[in-house]
Amino acid sequence: MVFRISAILFFAVVLPVSVASAQDNMQAGPDEVTARSDSALVHSYLEEAGVSKGEGDIRRQRKLLGRAYEAADSLDVSLLLKAVEKDLGEYYLETSSYDSAETVLRRAAERSSDGIIQTRTLNLLATAYRYQSKYPEAMKTYNQGLALVDSLESPKVYAAIKTNKASIYENLGNLSKAVSLYQDGITFAEIVEDSSFLATALNNLGNLYFQKGDYEEAIPYLEESIAISEQQGFYNTLLRSKHNLASAHRDLGNYKKSREVYEEAWALQKKVRPDIPPIQLLHSMGVFYLKVSELKKAEEHFQESLEYARQAGVPAGLFHNLIGLGDVSVARSDYTEATDFYSNAFDVGQKVDVPPFRVTAADKLYKSYKKANNFDKALKYHELVKQVSDSLTEAQQDEQLALAETELGLRQQQKINQLLQERQDEQEARIQTQNWLIIAFTVVLIIVIISLYLLYRSNKERERINKELEELNEVKNKMMGIIAHDLRSPMSSMQGVFYLLKNEDLELEEIREIASELEISIRENINMMDNLLNWANSQMTGLKIDIEKVSAFEAVDEVIENLSFSASHKSITLVNEVDTTIEAEADINLLQLIIRNLVSNAIKFSNEGDSVTITAKEQNDEVIFKVEDTGIGIPEEEREGLFSLQGNSRSGTNNENGSGLGLKLCKEFVEKQNGTIELESTVGEGSTFYVSLPKAS
């Protein structure tokens, strides 16, 4: 918990000095002339004290106020004495002498019925109550001041009291109400262009966000308050704002910036308030040094602040500095010394009867005793924390209720609030209109973007379809070329053979040789026809797949048997090394078509005396078929497009023709069975195709 003193809005009373004309003095008696002269002297003291306050010369301010009080008291003029007591009470508030301020201001509030001075005095008296945590008395006194002032005749005083009431809500945890009142104060200051009021209101709101822990939200308000105060020479507000800004940067972890601003605040403190104990600033700097682990400096600052608090009789200063010294001891792992400081802080909290102090001190004692392994005492203070916290919650609720009842008693309609509310309503209406325009523009922009995106997708889809149509047209042309050339050749050969047979122009041996060649050609074309029909069927009607448990050996063996004639014609050995126990999840017809195409390609691109070996092995959840030949291999530049119809088909070692459709079907049918196909090839050494299919479960 950070010790702080909330900012107060001070308004120096500048009463018109009565300057008697020569004629008046001539007509007045000696005693009356003397009284008027002494009254003017009192006012001059007050004016000079106000100037000294603005310049930060607190010592001279106090001396002048003392002289003004002596002169006013000797005259025994109630109104004049009340004005002096008001300024004197304001001085005591500035110097943290709250008891003296309360005494002087209460006496001043009872002396006269003058509305403006009475209101300003009540504002200061309520602030003295607030500084002593007497919130119901403070709220009641603020409302008494509001009841005496006309919001239009004295808008600055009215707004000041409303803003000071925000501090009560802030201290009692009603932060939304506090923020609202502070914002009203800032709005008022901007309307009437009062720089002093604006700087103070900005500092108050920044300090509220700091106390909430919204440090990044606090910083802009504090920086704006500093800028105004530096420009206008409002040194007291400048000191408060720099102090709060340094603490905000400290708790954000911006230690370099925090140290810099603390040093500026300290220099300003010595210049502006040399005779006022810097209790709060020393404590805040002690917290800073504790956070950056400069423990000796932290201890020195807490001790100095503690001594000033003892001299000034400020219980809050005693409490927070004792807590700070306890925290330093904890950082040094000296829990015995820490518990001594925390115990003294707890005693202060009990003496002044401030429950939050007791909660904080008890929680510190609980943690210290726990770290010191004194669990009995740790448990005692842990239970005490809960008890005091519960009572504190009830007390806060009671105070909130009391404040609400007090507020209900204030029935006077305040015109300044209406003015501010109307201005706010106009601003909100403009903002609402702007929001609707932004929403409409956003909706239109989104529609345009979606339309452009759909148009783009439509164009891309059209391009894709056109490309597919072009590819299909190329495939059609290729198929027609295959049918026209590759299928026509064996038919022409057969027609020639039949013609020779018919005319009995061939010998028996020649017929056998031609028949053998013709059989091979017909087998290749049957295989090509199978591929064409399967591809056409898959393109037009969709492929129907019947997945079942298939014996890998039997599927391969049947393919080898069908292709053995073609292989023997080129003296190529077909070897089935598939284990008879291996089973795959596949469509038997598609699997045999895949193996047949791969083996046929291997025969086509092998030389006489080469071999083609088919193996299979189980690996994880797959069966991997391997079709390996010792043929001529596939050049690197021909592998691209090998599994599509875009590649060029090449002739075999015996000038065998091909459509290029077989490997495309292999890839398509393998993938439809949740498998993969891969190729390895070395020119002059052979090629190996790998087909992976799911293993039978």
Image (cartoon, grey):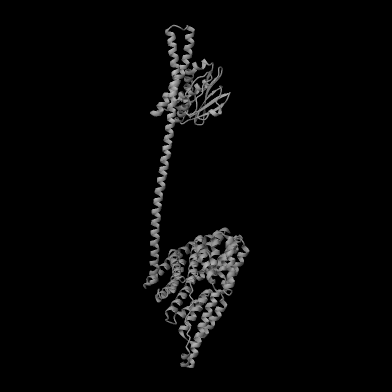
Whether residue 137 can be seen here: no
175 left or right of 254 in image:
left
Where residue 543 sits: x, y (%)?
40, 28
The quarter of the displayed image where residue 396 is located: bottom left
Please, is residue 193 above or below residue 464 in the view?
below
Where residue 554 sits: x, y (%)?
47, 21
Please, is residue 202 above or below residue 670 in the view?
below
Where residue 607 sits: x, y (%)?
55, 19
- The one of 243 and 279 positioned closer to us in this rendering: 243
The quarter of the displayed image where residue 256 is located: bottom right
- The one of 667 and 560 positioned closer to us in this rendering: 667
Quick one: which residue is furthest to the right in this view? 296
- The one of 607 and 142 positioned closer to us in this rendering: 607
Please, is residue 303 above or below residue 88 in the view?
above
396 left or right of 260 in image:
left
Please tell me which residue is depicted at 48% across the width and 65% down the height of the picture.
Answer: 205
